[in-house]
Image: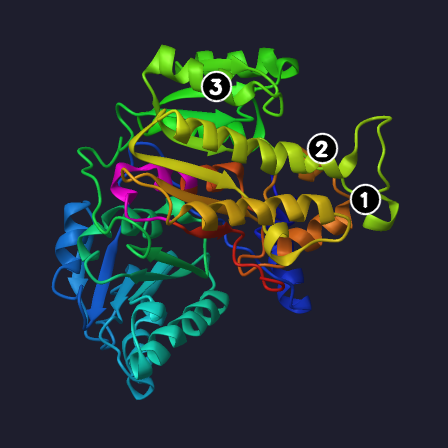
Amino acid sequence: MSDLYQGFTQSAIGKQVTRLLGLPTPTKLERYRAGAPLVTGTVAVGGRGRLADSLVGVLESLGIAAVEQDGTTPADGTTYKGLVLDATGLTSSDELVALRDFFTPLLRSLDTCPRVVVIGTPPELVEHGERVAQRALEGFTRSLGKEIGRGGTVQLVYVAPGAEGAVHSTLAFLLSPKSAYVSGQVIRIGAHGATTSGPVDDWLHPLEGRVAIVTGASRGIGEQIARVLHRDGATVVGVDVPQAAEELQSVMKEIGGDHLLLDITAKDAPQRIARHLKEKHGGVDVVVHNAGITRDRKLANMAASSEKGDRFEQVIAVNLTAPERITRELLDQGVINDNGSIIGVASIAGIAGNVGQTNYAASKAGVIGLVDSLADELDRGITVNAVAPGFIITQMTAAVPFATREVGQRLNAMAQGGLPVDVAETIAWYASPGSTAVNGNVVRVCGQMMLGA
């Protein structure tokens, strides 16, 4: 679905109107195309710390052109598609000036839709002045994300000591157009569980030979998740309610996947899913809990009801209790293979709240709680993470009143809504065998909302 306002701002008269009125002019975001290189352009690398000597080699192993930069203003005409600063060597607050010294001379030499990554050490793993300096990186990156403009993104990646060799998958995602609508995020590598990553033989098809199950896969975000996982090489098992049979079967047929029709809230749903995965696929590598519903109403008007189903109970049952029960069954039966991935779809509403969505926000905050509860419990290299989408343009949001929809799309650093593929790309990064040290994270796919989170 097109963004009419964005299209207007690109027209001759639109450019004049937006300039005169000071209205936002969203940049058309670059998104990944199958088979394309991860980065078209050069990434400048700098800083001092645990990763400084290896970063250029890491990027070159991903097919990304990289050069070392000491923060000097580049020669005329030189542009960079990305900047990566190793800030793990900052041990006191007075050393934070290194951020300015590296970035200020380079920011005006960035190409359109640039990617900026700062690498630090998890503050909770260090002490005293080093903890102060490392925590300060969060404020820096989130602020830079709101001022970089031109479709740019800025992220902070905390790498635990010993996990320096597990950054490939995350840098591939964050420096490429796959992360088009992800900005201002803090990601931890090696902070929970494994500090090493699994091998990736083909960065264009990192999921080759893996099996993924996606609930709510018949349309919208779920359909895009299924398509992106298939593009990356996975065999996809789509799950949805019997009422969506025709749509689900059509999608799965197109991508050569399998399907299972059931209500995930049914008492026997976890057992049926486990049995299907074991008998037909010998297990599963990627579990994506995407299925979800909304039953919006202010809490004062949400009295218990059985006439058409209880609004509060329905939402909790589908969005939270079902993923809990299914996950537990798959773990208890050993259906999830070694180095597998469990991925929940939360929501920005579960972080910032939303009027009329106490039930929905509670369920999505609970998904984040599921990540927190499992991150240090899992073994065999299994990881658990979540995405928290913001305003994603779907058929559902198209039905939102125009004024509300416009406000929802513009109140982020990119001044536009995201697409279902943006959520799918983030999930594919979590699912990669190269992300086995990425555990216990919740990444917002929201264009970096200006308020509330």
Q: CA distance from mark 1 to mark 2?
A: 13 Å
Q: Nearer the viewer, residue 99 or 170?
A: 170
Q: Is 123 displayed left or right of 252 in the figure?
A: left
Q: Which mark is residue 314?
A: 2
Q: Amino acid at mark 3?
A: Ile
Which comes sooner in the sequence, label 1 or label 3?
Answer: 3
Which comes sooner in the sequence, label 1 or label 2?
Answer: 1
Q: CA distance from mark 1 to mark 3?
A: 32 Å
Q: Which mark is residue 297?
A: 1
Circle 1/circle 2 CB separation < 8 Å? no
Q: Nearer the viewer, residue 96 or 309?
A: 309
Q: Nearer the viewer, residue 26 or 84?
A: 84
Q: Is residue 337 above or below residue 149?
A: above
Q: Amino acid at mark 2?
A: Gln
Q: Is residue 347 above or below residue 25?
A: above
Which comes sooner in the sequence, label 2 or label 3?
Answer: 3
Residue on which the image places disc 3: 273
Q: Residue 74: x and y, percent?
A: 23, 72
The range drawn in magenta is: 427-439
Circle 1/circle 3 CB separation < 8 Å? no
- Give the residue at the far bottom of this rendering: 94
